[in-house]
Amino acid sequence: MILKYLLAYVYFYGLFTKTSIPAALKKHISMEVKMIKLNKEALKDKIHACWIGKNIGGTIGTPYEGRRELLDVKGFSTPGGAPLPNDDLDLQLIWLLAMEEHGPYQLNAQILGEYWISYITPHWNEYGIGKCNMKAGLLPPVSGEYQNHWKHSNGAWIRSEIWACMAPASPDVAIRYALQDACVDHGMAEGTYAEFFTAALESAAFVITDIRKLIDIGLSKIPSDCRVARSVNIVLDAYDKGLDWVTARNLLVEDSTDLGWFQAPANIGFTVLGLLYGEGDFKKSVIYAVNCGDDTDCTGATVGAVLGIMKGMKGIPEDWRSHIGDGIVTISLDNSCWAVAKTCTELTERTFDMVPLVLKANKANVMLHDGDDVVSDEDINKMYSTDIAQKLYSTPGYSYSFDFIYAGARVEFDGEPVIEPSGSINVKVRFFNKMNDAKHLNIQLHLPEGWTASGWRRDVYLRHQEPASALWSATITANEHVEAVNRVIIEASVMGRPSVCLIPITILG
């Protein structure tokens, strides 16, 4: 705050005295002026409306989940007084807890995976496959990639609001965390692209109320040729041609026949359909999405959350809000997890408390203040940038990362991490320099008894300038004895530094 007023003083002093302002100060002044500024109370109101909208849409849609025909839902079919439980919200309570306990600098897929195993109870579909793979020693995103025929499904994008709410008006920050989340049980597949789309759209919705612009920002964060993008574009094309919502819905169903039910592309399409054809009306939008069928709790809940972010609590219909109240009812959490939020109000307060930390940790161009929202056209245009998204969604599915303070590493497999007796597998490790001094990494390999490795080197040189990375590789060969789970350890150290990194390479037999 002191810097802010000092810069302002120097700036206006220069105007009146015609004294030139040093370039460094000009830069600071420019940064201060160009920051997106969000009103604290308005932001908190929108976060609260996000969670209420999520609960409303999920409660309306849950009784019809999995029905694939065109529906004729007109509102709630459950008694008033409480929402229905929904895993869409449950997992986000755990993700918030993980963020509170580990902070925005450290939170990653490995941490979320451990919280998943500890606190998330369902074993269905991708949830179960991801947990099964992690219990075998496979780290994310390999845990979401290996033998996972549900990796294109809906489990990730339905839990994206927590990242958007902690990174408002910062789509590229939201998708960084969305990747760490989605890859645990979806690898690098359509389910992960879907969470990129919703997280970016929802983050931008804190400052943009044009639904078409929000959809375009979401599209800018995913591969243009992926199935999620294809489904979204089918809806956009139908809407632009003036086709009715039922026709648009049927086009989506037909296009997704090869994927089957409960898959992200079609259900993202149903969500976009609700937002577009509902034209900003909360009730119409949620009902359109639910009446498309399939994963109705997810589509209705996401539409409700998006509109909650866009409009705040004043945009939530009072009769629907009073029908569900403020409570949160869980269904997917272990009973030992008592530290999660119990109401939407508590969830709002705890989410809001993390916002400044997340923005600061990610150097986001957003600040909170007591005045009006301030956002420029230039700020909006930057939200369409594809640079960060392309780097994120280009992460190999059969890979995982490790951090050892002064450097980082990403283990990469050419394919499935599986080896046969007397067979071989190629392993690559991409090392990244995280500090501004060059260094020699000393590499040691610890192999199962009787196993061998070839083609690897003991010294890896990391430059302190771009490209500050180096690729190491080895061919690992088993003997005739292979366990169900086999572990190779790469030991990386640097002379003169106390920290040693032990990188496990888990290979299934």
Image (tube, rainbow, N blue to C red):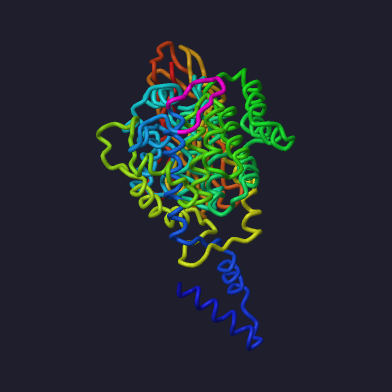
Q: Does 253 sit above or below residue 319?
A: above
Where residue 57 sits in the image (x, y, percent)?
46, 36
Q: Quadrant of the N terminus?
A: bottom left
Give left or right: position of 52 versus 273.
left
Q: Residue at x 62, y 83 (%)?
A: 14
Q: Who is closer to the viewer here, 185 or 219?
A: 219
Q: Quadrant of the C terminus?
A: top left
Q: Which residues are magenta?
A: 63-75
Total labels: the figure holds 0
Quarter-wise, where is residue 391 in the image? Answer: top right
Where residue 236 sits in the image (x, y, percent)?
68, 36
Where residue 95 sits in the image (x, y, percent)?
39, 41
Q: Who is closer to the viewer here, 40 or 484?
A: 40
Where residue 378 sits in the image (x, y, percent)?
65, 59
Can the viewer see residue 66? yes
Give left or right: position of 409 versus 339.
right
* Residue 470: in magenta span: no
Q: Residue at x 49, y 67 (%)?
A: 371
Q: Residue at x 48, y 27 (%)?
A: 144
